[in-house]
Image (cartoon, rainbow, N blue to C red):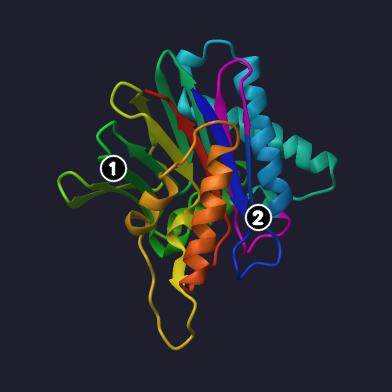
Amino acid sequence: MNTDIFLKMGKQHKVCEDYIIQGNDPVPFIILADGCSSSKNTEMGARILCYLAKQYIRYHANVSNFHYDIMGSWIIHNAEMTARQLGLTRECLDATLIIAYAFNNKTHVFVYGDGSIILESPNKDLIIYQVKFSNNAPYYLSYLLDPDRQDIYHNMKNDKEIIIYNSKEQKTTSDTLAYDAKFNITISFTDFLKILICSDGIDSFILDNPSKNISFPAKEIVPGFLSFKTTKGEFLKRRLQKEIQTLEKNSMIHYDDLSVGAFLLEE
């Protein structure tokens, strides 16, 4: 199995607030965080969250039995202590967090906030899971640190929506959940050889023309991201760099930061 990651700042950003890391100790993992643009210093908070999530995986040997709430609570409370020591406020931790790791021929993905999970089967069928929130306001782990902010968010009456696109059936389904509902899935490499996790930048591709308000859904962008010519080394970086160059030549840009991680099991 090969893993690789990709990170690129959005065209409308001056600071990249996404961050992504990968590793193999004790199991292959990819972790990404997407900082909130309206909160201060979230480029730092995203990094803190990623490295605390990495520490959680390293400290807890039984990776087959991670609990969504326990892991999230451990990460955010330790991240708060780290941020405080750096002279940062809790606000810097306003970020989506996606943790994915491979174990026993399966990939386990935990999503705190929004983002996408992209699966491709051996016969090239595509399934895309997208986690979105009403009013484009994700529920961050950082709200667990502050009862007042938690109450404010609760009173916004936001919902979490799970949108699933299936290319074989050519249909999209959705399910609306409470904003704080858990979302984690387990994916078998028997069913899917390519697994990507993405920040919501995957949904930010638009036509670079101020006079035309045209956007491109993830299902139109993703196939080009998965067309790997080779699968060794930095296979994802090579593919996405080339694909984004091609898209930009056709006046298609992503305005939001984009972070992508890939697990690839060769047949």
Give the x, y percent position of residue 71: 55, 26
Q: Nearer the viewer, residue 123 or 84?
A: 123
Give the residue pinned by disc 1.
Answer: 126
Instruction: State left or right for residue 215 relative to residue 75.
Output: left
Q: Earlier in the sequence, mark 1 or mark 2?
A: 2
Label at residue 17:
2
Q: Residue furthest front?
A: 229
- Residue 39: within the magenta? yes
Q: Residue furthest left?
A: 169
Give the x, y percent position of residue 28: 55, 22
Instruction: State left or right for residue 150 relative to residue 220.
Output: right
Instruction: State left or right for residue 128 relative to residue 148.
Output: left
Q: Nearer the viewer, residue 146 or 249?
A: 249
Q: Is residue 97 shown to the viewer in this render? A: no
Secondary structure under the numbered disc 1 in the rendered image: strand
Q: Which residues are magenta?
A: 22-41
Residue at screen point 74% across, 48% down: 44
Query: How far separated are the C-alphas under marks 1 and 2?
Result: 28 Å
Tell me if residue 64 comes above or below residue 157 in the rendering. Answer: above
Tell me if residue 128 comes above or below residue 248 in the rendering. Answer: above
- Residue 177: within the magenta? no
Give the x, y percent position of residue 220: 34, 58
Q: Amino acid at mark 1?
A: Leu
Q: Residue furthest bottom?
A: 211
Secondary structure under the numbered disc 2 in the rendered image: loop
Q: Which mark's residue is nearer the viewer, 1 or 2?
A: 1
Residue at screen point 39% across, 57% down: 221
Number of callouts in the render?
A: 2
Q: Amino acid at mark 2?
A: Glu
Label at residue 39:
none
Give the x, y percent position of residue 6: 59, 45
